[in-house]
Image (spheres, rainbow, N blue to C red):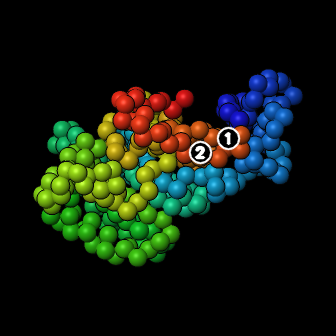
Amino acid sequence: MTNRSWQEVEGAHTFVDDVPVTEDLLPDEETRIYTRGEQMDPCFAGHDFTSAPPAIPAEFLPHHIALVMDGNGRWARARGLPRLAGHRAGTENLRPILEASVEFGIEILTIWAFSTENWRRPEGEVRGLLGILRQMIRRELKELHKQGVRLRHIGRLDRLPPALQKQVQEAIELTRNNDRIILNVAFDYGGRAEIVQAVRRIVEAGIPADQVDEALLSSYMYTAGQPDPDLIIRTSGELRTSGFMLWQSAYTEYYVTETFWPDFDKEELRRALLAYAHRDRRFGGIKDDYGSPHEVHAPEEALDDGGEEGDEG
């Protein structure tokens, strides 16, 4: 598969392979036009590009998406509202994005709702965020269960108020057998804290050092048993990880949008998925002309001679 650049022309998405976009390619108000160079992207083969945006084939979609829901406070400030109003608006946006994720065929959605560092925020804001979580569980749990959503919590549970801990545990138990989509709620979560917690548990289990490998460490992470995220989406334009899923994101693709989280909608999600569909994921290896990954093994003697690890090319 050839590399592509992605451009937007007056609201229309246009593929460009060294082909200039001329005025005759610009869409009218009712039509989205998708153009490519001489070779049609197999992702959209057979689609009429003068019609509605094409569905993305399942093989080009991520299995696991993680969301850094950033920008609630700035969204509120721009409207002259208190920060907590932005957090409430962000919470209201969860259901439509979850529904859109199900519609797109996403299997796992992870949302970062509260970090280990968020305890440093003003006490009133922290209380408000805990209250929003309580309200969300109380209001949404029955419908989430009905829609086949399996809830999981990732992060520390022990620092939450006892009543809230009980709510979370009951929600996890109620939805345990649901299989339409997994919703991981990262609350009191930090990537470094997760790794430290995993190492502590390994030490406490008395596992010898020579038995510790990546697979073992992964099994002690909060996301044990789940695939790593294929795509992390961060809203509000911030270009940093903030420590989110540090262990799991070694080869995760990132997508950053300037849109604040309360305004992030289904169309924004679709754009992120389209961008992901055109990423060249090599996982440190190479691909042939058809996009198939080839696993490359270095000779053992090269590894023993102090050879440096190669980059991704």
Q: Nearer the viewer, residue 81 or 179?
A: 179
Image quarter of residue 204: bottom left
Q: Which residue is mark 1?
A: 288
Dot 2 amino acid type: His
Image quarter of residue 116: top left
Quadrant of the image for the N terminus? Answer: top right
Dot 1 amino acid type: Asp
- Is residue 263 visible in the rendered image? The answer is no
Vertical comparison of 232 with 91: above or below? above
At 67% across and 33% down in the image, what residue appears? 3
At 19% across and 50% down in the image, what residue appears? 209
Q: Which residue is mark 2?
A: 294
Local crowd at mark 2 within 10 Å, few (<14), some, or many (≥20)?
few
Specify which label sits upstream in the sequence, 1 or 2.
1
Local crowd at mark 1 within 10 Å, few (<14), some, or many (≥20)?
few
Relative side of 42 to 173, left or right: right
At 40% across and 29% down in the image, what residue appears? 307
Secondary element type, mark 1? loop
- Give residue 273's position: percent from left, percent from top: 59, 46
Calculate the distance from the C-alpha at mark 1 to the C-alpha at mark 2. 8 Å
Secondary element type, mark 2? strand
- Give residue 299's position: percent from left, percent from top: 47, 39
Image quarter of residue 80: top left
Quadrant of the image for the C terminus? Answer: top right
- Give residue 215's position: percent from left, percent from top: 34, 55
Q: Which mark is residue 182?
A: none
Asked if the residue under mark 2 is in contact with the one under mark 1, i.e. CB atoms within 8 Å, the reply is yes
- Give residue 279's position: percent from left, percent from top: 60, 39
- Is residue 102 visible in the rendered image? The answer is yes
Vertical comparison of 90 with 102: above or below? above
